[in-house]
Amino acid sequence: MKDSMKFAWGLIAFTVLFILGLVLLLTEKIGGGVYLIFVVASIAALLVPILFFKGRAISIDQESIRISAPFIDMEIPLKSIDSIHTFDVFKPYLRSWGYKGLHCSSGLFEHKTYGGVGCAFDDRVPLYIMIVSGKRKTVINMRTLEETKDLLMRLTTLSGKEVTEEIASGTEECKKKSKRRLIIVCSISAVAAIALVVGIVLSMTMGSVNVTLTDSDVEIDASLKSEISIPYSDITYIELRDDVDYGHRVIGTSNSKVLIGDFDNDEFGRYTLAVYKGVSKSIVIHTTGETYVVNLSDNGSTEELYQDLMTKI
């Protein structure tokens, strides 16, 4: 599989995982902790393919020069080459699309003078070859200086083009295109960053607890947890308290607004908790097999729920 295809699949996996995590968070199917796992997994899906990149491969024959590297895969007919140029240093200032490692770069980059340039080079090699073919400019080198010099000699010989100094770059047009690409790249990056921040903020601030008393049972509907039904016949007794030590979370959600899930403390052991953090009072429901601790959005509503529940048991 080509390096570009590996990254494409990684990008698809990143997008699917990120959007899925955000949707599940917004629909309150998962909590903030699980959402962060989705974020980490999506980033890993994007980065892992890079570990398996094969690197660049450049070959030349009588008809064309072929360049294969992450995010760039092209064949340039030798007869289409307009000019060949060399540089001791070549430093693009913006990556539009591609891979930028510690030393190797490949893909489409922006250069302040030449605009969009296809790149497949290693900056440890002090010789860069620019091939101009129509409006397309491509900068390459090999793994060593000697290999790059050999490639340059073969390229000039087979194409019949000598290395020249002047480059018909159309500098102003290149700058305009470069600016447009910069705006697009920055816009996409900003949207992605905003989506990530919004997701994290929502994961830390959302959640709700609703308790309904039916004719036969107590129904607890809390965000990110399956609905719980407790038959009145199973309840042994209830307490209205303001001194419950909630203990630590085993599994569930804990953010700035709610505590929901399975928790553990010294008094109850493992129990079910669904409370608002900012409400001091809570109702402890003891049953024949389990303990539940709940409250509503304020102390008054919680006390009223307690009184209503007392009339049911």
Image (cartoon, grey):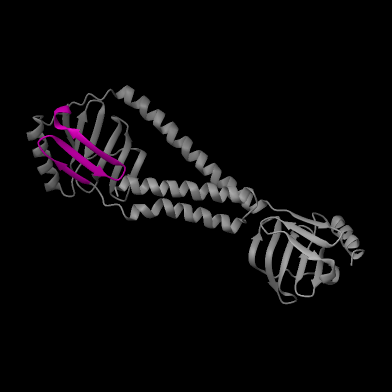
For residue 273, say whether it is visible: yes
**Residue 59 x %, y %:** 16, 43
Quick check: can you spot residue 241? Answer: no
Q: Position of residue 142 (x, y in %)?
A: 18, 46
From what the image shows, is residue 186 above or below residue 239? Answer: above
- Residue 194 against residue 39 in the figure, above or below: above
- The x, y position of residue 138, in whole percent, is 24, 35
Q: Is residue 67 magenta?
A: yes
Classified by dominant secondary structure, the portion drawn in magenta counts as: strand
Quarter of the figure with residue 299:
bottom right
| Residue under the image location 45 percent in, 52 percent down | 43
User: Left of 136 or right of it: where is 306?
Assistant: right
Q: Nearer the viewer, residue 169 or 158?
A: 158
- Depth order, front residue of 120/67: 67
Q: Quadrant of residue 282?
A: bottom right
Q: Quadrant of residue 227?
A: bottom right
Q: Quadrant of the C terminus?
A: bottom right
Highlighted range, magenta:
57-80
Q: Nearer the viewer, residue 104 or 290?
A: 290
Q: Is residue 295 magenta?
A: no
Q: Residue at x 33, y 55 (%)?
A: 51
How many marks are shown on the rendered structure? Answer: 0
State the residue lying farthest toward the right.
311
| Lateral position of residue 196 relative to residue 171, left or right | right
